[in-house]
Image (cartoon, rainbow, N blue to C red):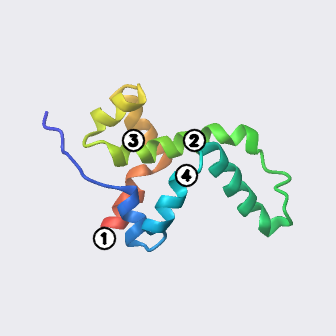
Amino acid sequence: MKIKEKKVSLLKKFRDEEKINIDFEVKLSSISLEDLIALKLELSSRDFGGKLFGLPLFHSMKEIVNDALMKYSYSASRTKKEAAALLGMSTKDYRSYLRKFKTEELFEKSDK
């Protein structure tokens, strides 16, 4: 079975959509992942008076992180087999998560 290689990049997608630029990337690289998540939560809470009451943040974080890992692995790998290996899972499980998080759709939209 021939495996189709792909080349996608979340950085390129966001640059093309003008969501980020080189200056932003330089600043972003100096912030830890934990601090970045805390900052994003703080920014998101502004619309709600500084609080995110009623949202199950603690229990939702695993899904949020898994979604981010799927986006990263899809972007960083040439094949699904390689991406699955990067995350330490079977190709079958990887494909299941691709469907669950609609990862491929995110990148397909940027190709159009």
Amino acid at circle 3:
Ser
Real-space Cα distance between discs 3 and 2?
12 Å
The numbered disc on residue 30 is 4
Amino acid at circle 1:
Lys
Real-space Cα distance between discs 4 and 1?
32 Å
**Viewer-side label of 2, 4:** 4
**Viewer-side label of 4, 1:** 4
Q: Earlier in the sequence, mark 3 or mark 1?
A: 3
Looking at the picture, does residue 82 appear above or below residue 101? above
Q: What residue is shown with label 2? A: 65
**Viewer-side label of 3, 1:** 3
Could you say whether the residue bearing mark 4 is in a helix, strand or loop?
Answer: loop
Residue under the point 44% across and 48% down? 71
Q: Quadrant of residue 1?
A: top left
Query: Is 13 on the left-hand or right-hand side of 44?
Result: left
Could you say whether the residue bearing mark 2 is in a helix, strand or loop?
Answer: helix
Q: What residue is shown with label 1? A: 112
Q: Earlier in the sequence, mark 1 or mark 2?
A: 2
Q: Quadrant of residue 56?
A: top right
**Viewer-side label of 1, 2:** 2
